[in-house]
């Protein structure tokens, strides 16, 4: 019996959660088997030593989970989606820092009490005479740097490229910390050592396979190149990509990809939504000039090669449980919605309403394309809402009043929302306050 999309996802989520709990049980069991003496005899610093050891193991385990979250592993990302994984990634990042800081702190205090020496002396002993501890110390310093730039108030002030390159140091930190784990931890001998090697190899293997090898495989298979660059609005451009066997590069309308444009000062990775549905002939990304990188899109030459890592994301029609849709888009957030409307208009006779917010009339992307869809799809309606007052258009913002007036049956619809983060947050809150069931609300954030 073939399972439907939602049932299949629930089973996969349950299986993944079970695996996480099972490995947590195994790790605690290994800790108890090798550090149980310290727990049973907690005096003279032994209790602190036991806590320090479990903090270290849990920190290392959450680090393995963190690797899986950022590996873009298809069987994880395809179930949870980028947005949820990104939030979990940040939360776990802070918990890793707490665990890894408590690990040496408790061990220093515990062993100093046991050996009747000062904390400075004990720290010196660890760094100079314990295998792998010095490497782990430098790994911890690097982690502190990486996590510190991930704090919201710091991250918002950084360029994407700075954040990206600093995060590459994570792989160096992993290597430094791993050396310590297999030399002095509770998993440094016997069956625990083989188990720990397996966990780390599995995580690193998925990272290498999906984040590095798969994009290279797709690049070799399809030879993605820029066919043309087309202006959509004065500051928005569509990148048309062709290649070999594109009929075998399938993606769902609404998904996105991480792309590397192999041109000078543009080769680092950025995420962009597919702005047209799958057609087997070309791929299109529509990009608004919002920074140093995106402002260069208009100058990308025909024939420039592109590495595409994707498709990714769960902003897709398959998640919907209804056949009536309300699409809400703000600015360049129209790109995945444009692809989804194209797909639904040509394959199904579903009821679709689009509320599209833009600054001015000249900033409306895909207007001619939407006009063509309106001609052949009688169940599609669109309202443009401009922040400036122009005759023939709604003015202002997509607020409660407009949703109620323009889409009186919005409670009966599946809502797909995409736009600037502040706009999405406000609109989602408005819908919730109006009694909308958020299990029928779908959106993803491209934040770093």
Image: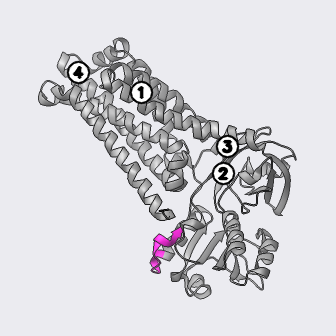
> Counting residues from the N terminus, which is met first, the one under dot 2 or under dot 1?
1
- In the picture of the structure, the residue carrying the numbered disc 1 is 197
Residue 150 in view in this figure: no
Which is in the foreground here, disc 2 or disc 1?
1
Q: Position of residue 56 (x, y in %)?
A: 33, 31
Span of residues in magenta: 432-442
Crowding around mark 4 (Cα neighbors within 10 Å: few <14, some 14 to 19, many 20+) is many
Q: Nearer the viewer, residue 137 or 370?
A: 370
Residue 364 lies in the magenta-colored region:
no
Q: Secondary structure at mark 4?
A: helix
The residue at 47%/30% (across/down) is 201
- In the picture of the structure, the residue carrying the numbered disc 4 is 111
Residue 435 lies in the magenta-colored region:
yes
> Counting residues from the N terminus, which is met first, the one under dot 2 or under dot 4?
4
- In the picture of the structure, the residue carrying the numbered disc 2 is 257
- In the picture of the structure, the residue carrying the numbered disc 3 is 269
Q: Position of residue 363 (x, y in %)?
A: 77, 68
């Amino acid at each position: 019996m073939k399972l439907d999309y939602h049932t299949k996802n629930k089973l996969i989520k349950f299986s993944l959660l079970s695996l996480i709990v099972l490995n947590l049980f195994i790790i605690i069991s290994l800790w108890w088997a090798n550090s149980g003496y310290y727990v049973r005899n907690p005096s003279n610093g032994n209790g602190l030593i036991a806590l320090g050891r479990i903090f270290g193991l849990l920190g290392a385990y959450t680090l393995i989970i963190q690797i899986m979250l950022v590996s873009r592993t298809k069987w994880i990302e395809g179930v949870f989606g980028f947005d949820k994984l990104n939030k979990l990634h940040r939360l776990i990042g802070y918990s890793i820092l707490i665990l890894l800081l408590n690990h040496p702190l408790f061990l220093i205090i515990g062993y100093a009490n046991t050996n009747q020496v000062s904390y400075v002396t004990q720290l010196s002993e660890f760094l100079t005479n314990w295998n792998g501890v010095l490497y782990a110390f430098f790994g911890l310093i690097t982690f502190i740097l990486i996590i510190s730039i991930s704090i919201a108030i710091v991250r918002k002030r950084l360029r994407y490229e700075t954040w990206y390159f600093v995060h590459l140091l994570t792989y160096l930190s992993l290597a430094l910390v791993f050396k310590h784990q297999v030399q002095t931890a509770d998993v440094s001998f016997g069956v625990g050592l083989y188990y720990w090697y397996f966990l780390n190899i599995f995580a690193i293997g998925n990272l290498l396979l999906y984040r590095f090898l798969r994009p290279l495989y797709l690049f070799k298979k399809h030879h993605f190149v820029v066919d043309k660059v087309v202006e959509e609005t004065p500051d928005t451009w569509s990148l048309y990509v062709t290649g070999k066997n594109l009929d075998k590069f399938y993606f769902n309308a609404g998904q996105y990809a991480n792309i590397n444009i192999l041109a000078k000062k543009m080769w680092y990775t950025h995420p962009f939504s597919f702005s047209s549905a799958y057609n087997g002939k070309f791929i299109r990304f529509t990009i608004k000039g919002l920074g140093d990188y995106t402002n260069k899109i208009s100058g990308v030459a025909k024939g420039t090669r592109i590495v595409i890592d994707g498709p990714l994301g769960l902003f897709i029609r398959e998640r919907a449980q209804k056949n009536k849709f309300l699409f809400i888009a703000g600015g360049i957030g129209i790109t995945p919605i444009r692809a989804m409307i194209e797909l639904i208009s040509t394959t199904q006779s579903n009821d679709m309403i689009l509320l599209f917010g833009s600054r001015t009339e000249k900033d409306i992307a895909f207007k001619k394309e939407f006009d063509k869809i309106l001609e052949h799809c009688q169940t599609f309606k669109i309202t443009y809402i401009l922040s400036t007052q122009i005759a023939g258009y709604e003015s202002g913002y997509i607020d409660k009043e407009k949703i109620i007036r323009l889409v009186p049956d919005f409670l009966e619809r599946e809502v797909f929302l995409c736009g600037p983060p502040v706009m999405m947050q406000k609109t989602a809150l408005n819908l919730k306050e109006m009694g909308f069931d958020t299990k029928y609300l779908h959106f993803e954030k491209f934040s770093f």
